[in-house]
């Protein structure tokens, strides 16, 4: 019962760390969506950009997360110690599933449907909004889900560069060689990931036109 | 009757491959022209040149007297009903929303759209109460095709372009659809350009037939002329019947 005692004793700090963590993930996911989804759309219009953009997002994914956080520290403007740098790293990590799923979702729309849409006199913007994005919505949302869940997990590393969040407890526990303290950070992080996953999955099902 | 559609020495090629070479013909108002030919003959290319989904690489296509290069493509397409194989229905929209799409794009008031959709569904033989709220995958092939025709007629365009619309329907339903389509477009006075590779379908629907072969126009004439001509390529097709 050491775990519950610890959680109870530190509930105020744990709660504020949890909210900090949610804030980190919310801001970075919001930014990643704001960049990744439009980027995925652009790729469907400019096939020449596909290889370089997906290549970049892929390479970012392969950088070990702790190293990426470290690399960003010395950079001007976006770097330094603290939450801002952590958010930049989380945005970079979140991009790949967003770009890839947006691109895949739109390109998998039946060409006949797209042809009918153009042939009926929809403008390019109408084809995108009324047809392509609606049909691609479940796939795009699956990308958002993967990206957010990834962000919740990797977000724990933000604490290594002073970004706060539930990682504070994990790193503290590692330093103290105390698994109870590690769990106090890891269990809420896992719960957050499960909640985000379940909630977004529900939304995904609601937006699925196949029902 | 004035010509609604005119092809003047139209050629279309892509990446150095000629899909359509120097084709000229015209379609008068109220006529039903069937573009007949094997796959790869250039039928679909010709059709897509009419609603500016493609622009000719040489020559010009006139619609209502104006070159498709000079038309605003969106305005042009909203005046042309377009029916393609069944998958052209938007899978995420109900029958009602599919049929009412062009009126909605044209910003008709909602009540008028609803009225028009009901009218069109009845016209193509689907009870609005039963079908309006279904999704395309909840319909049979023939029903989907009827919805496709209703959708193309929604904003009352003077002409219809049809690309093998009945290709994926079983033979019995197909014959029924052909008969209904013919009488419907005749009654409404629509100008129709219809693409098919099926000679029987061409004869059932056409007032005139244009035969395409490897991008060339090899015959244009009325159904009677098609039946009477001694042209070897037409005769070869007749023998298939």
Image (cartoon, coloured by chain):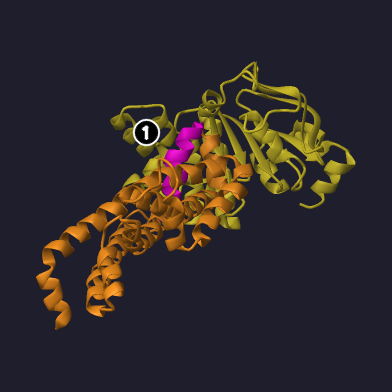
Chain colours: A orange, B yellow
B5, above or below A7, in the image? above
Q: Is residue A125 on the magenta stretch?
A: yes
Secondary structure mostly taken by the magenta-highlighted segment of the chain: helix
Sort mark 1 into few (<14), some (14-19) or many (20+) by Cα contacts within 10 Å: many
Residue B215 locus on image (x, y percent): 80, 38
- Residue A59: image quadrant is bottom right
**Looking at the rendering, which quadrant does residue A167 occupy?**
bottom left
* Residue located 49% across and 43% down the image: A39
Residue drawn where x is 26% and y is 64% of the image: A168
Q: Is residue A137 visible?
A: no
Up the image or down, B36 lies above or below A173; here it is above
Is B7 in the magenta? Answer: no
Question: Is residue A159 left or right of A67 when viewed as pictured?
Answer: left
Residue extending farthest bottom: A1
**Do we see residue B29 in this rendering?**
yes
Residue holding disc 1: B116
In front here: A111 or A199? A199
State which quadrant residue A163 falls in: bottom left
Q: Nearer the viewer, residue B152 or B72?
A: B72
Image position, residue A180 (x, y; %): 22, 78
| Residue B142: % across, % down | 51, 52
Residue at position x 23%, y 74% in the image: A181
Callout 1: residue from which chain? B
Mark 1, secondary structure of its residue? helix
- Left/right of residue A207 with respect to residue A115 in the rendered view: left
Q: Relative to residue B125, is residue B224 depicted above or below?
A: above
A25, above or below A31, in the image: below
The residue range painted magenta reads A121-138
């Amino acid at each position: 019962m050491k775990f519950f005692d610890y959680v109870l004793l530190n509930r105020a700090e744990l709660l504020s760390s949890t909210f900090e963590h949610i804030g980190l993930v919310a801001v970075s996911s919001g930014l990643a969506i704001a960049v990744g989804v439009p980027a995925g759309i652009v790729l469907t219009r400019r096939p020449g950009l596909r290889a370089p953009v997906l290549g970049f997002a892929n390479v970012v994914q392969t950088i070990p997360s702790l190293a990426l956080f470290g690399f960003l520290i010395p950079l001007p403007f976006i770097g330094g110690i603290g939450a801002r740098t952590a958010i930049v790293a989380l945005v970079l990590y979140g991009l790949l599933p967003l770009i890839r799923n947006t691109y895949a979702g739109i390109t998998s729309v039946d060409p006949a449907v797209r042809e009918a849409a153009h042939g009926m006199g929809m403008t390019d913007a109408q084809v995108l909004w009324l047809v392509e994005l609606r049909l691609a919505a479940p796939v795009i949302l699956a990308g958002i889900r993967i990206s957010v869940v990834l962000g919740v997990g990797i977000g724990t590393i933000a604490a290594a560069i002073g970004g706060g969040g539930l990682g504070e407890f994990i790193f503290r526990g590692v330093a103290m060689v105390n698994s109870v303290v590690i769990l106090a950070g890891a269990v809420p992080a896992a719960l957050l990931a499960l909640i985000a996953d379940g909630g977004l999955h529900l939304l995904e099902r609601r937006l699925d036109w196949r029902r | 009757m004035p010509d609604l559609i005119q092809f003047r020495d139209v050629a279309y090629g892509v990446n150095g491959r000629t899909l359509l070479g120097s084709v000229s013909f015209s379609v008068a108002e109220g006529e039903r022209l069937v573009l007949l030919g094997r796959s790869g003959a250039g039928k679909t290319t010709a059709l897509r040149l009419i609603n500016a989904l493609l622009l000719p690489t040489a020559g010009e296509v006139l619609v209502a007297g104006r070159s498709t290069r000079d038309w605003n493509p969106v305005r042009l397409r909203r005046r042309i009903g377009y029916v393609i194989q069944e998958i052209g229905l938007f899978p995420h929209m109900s029958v009602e929303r599919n049929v009412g799409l062009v009126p909605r794009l044209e910003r008709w008031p909602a009540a008028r759209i609803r009225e028009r959709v009901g009218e069109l569904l009845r016209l193509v033989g689907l009870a609005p109460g039963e079908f309006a709220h279904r999704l395309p995958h909840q319909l049979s092939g023939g029903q989907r095709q009827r919805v496709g025709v209703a959708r193309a007629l929604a904003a009352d365009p003077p002409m219809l372009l049809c690309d093998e619309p009945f290709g994926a329907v079983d033979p019995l339903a197909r014959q029924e659809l052909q008969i209904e389509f013919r009488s419907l477009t005749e009654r409404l006075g629509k100008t129709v350009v219809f693409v098919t590779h099926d000679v029987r379908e061409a004869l059932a629907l056409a007032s005139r037939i244009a035969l395409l072969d490897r991008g060339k126009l090899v015959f244009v004439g009325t159904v009677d002329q098609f039946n009477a001509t001694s042209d070897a390529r037409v005769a070869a097709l007749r023998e298939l019947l």
